[in-house]
Image (spheres, rainbow, N blue to C red):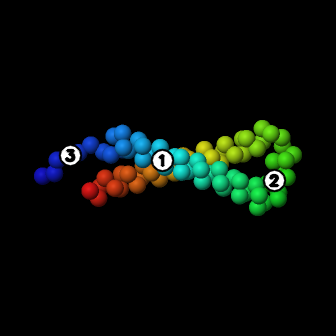
Amino acid sequence: MRTKKSSDLISATGLIKLMTHALMGAALGLVFSLALILCNPAVASLLANGGSQTVIVFTLTLVTTFAIGATLTGVVFIIAEDKQS
């Protein structure tokens, strides 16, 4: 009979793994928002006419969305990794 071991998600290394997933998602969201602004003239003109607050809200929305998605994906990866070992 196998002994129950604690999940890697609760440990310090699990939290570091989750933090790295969140930071990767934030960086990816920042790159995606920059690429969207540079490649799509309609978005660039909307942001230019909206003022400085519009750019900040647009960028933070994309960064937060990507960071949350990457963190949830990291949780799934860590849980799947736990089940394999």
- Asked if marks 3 and 1 touch (Cβ < 8 Å), the reply is no
Q: CA distance from mark 2 to mark 3?
A: 54 Å
Q: Position of residue 1 (x, y in %)?
A: 12, 52
Label 1 sits on a secondary structure element that is: helix
Specify the amino acid type for callout 1.
Thr
Q: Earlier in the sequence, mark 2 or mark 1?
A: 1
Q: Which residue is mark 3?
A: 4
Category of crowding for the residue at label 1, using alpha-carbon neighbours closer than 10 angstroms: few (below 14), some (14–19), many (at least 20): some
Category of crowding for the residue at label 2, using alpha-carbon neighbours closer than 10 angstroms: few (below 14), some (14–19), many (at least 20): some
Please report the residue visible at 85 percent of the width from the left and 47 percent of the height from the top: 48
Q: Which mark is residue 65?
A: none
Please report the residue visible at 71 percent of the width from the left and 58 percent of the height from the top: 35
Q: Earlier in the sequence, mark 3 or mark 1?
A: 3
Disc nearest the viewer among 2 and 1:
1
Q: Position of residue 84 (x, y in %)?
A: 29, 58
Specify the amino acid type for callout 3.
Lys
Left or right? Give the position of 63 relative to 49. Answer: left
Q: Position of residue 27 (x, y in %)?
A: 59, 50
Q: Which residue is mark 2?
A: 44
Q: Please, which residue is most extreme toward the left here?
A: 1
Q: CA distance from mark 2 to mark 1?
A: 30 Å
Specify the amino acid type for callout 2.
Ala
Q: Which residue is mark 1?
A: 20
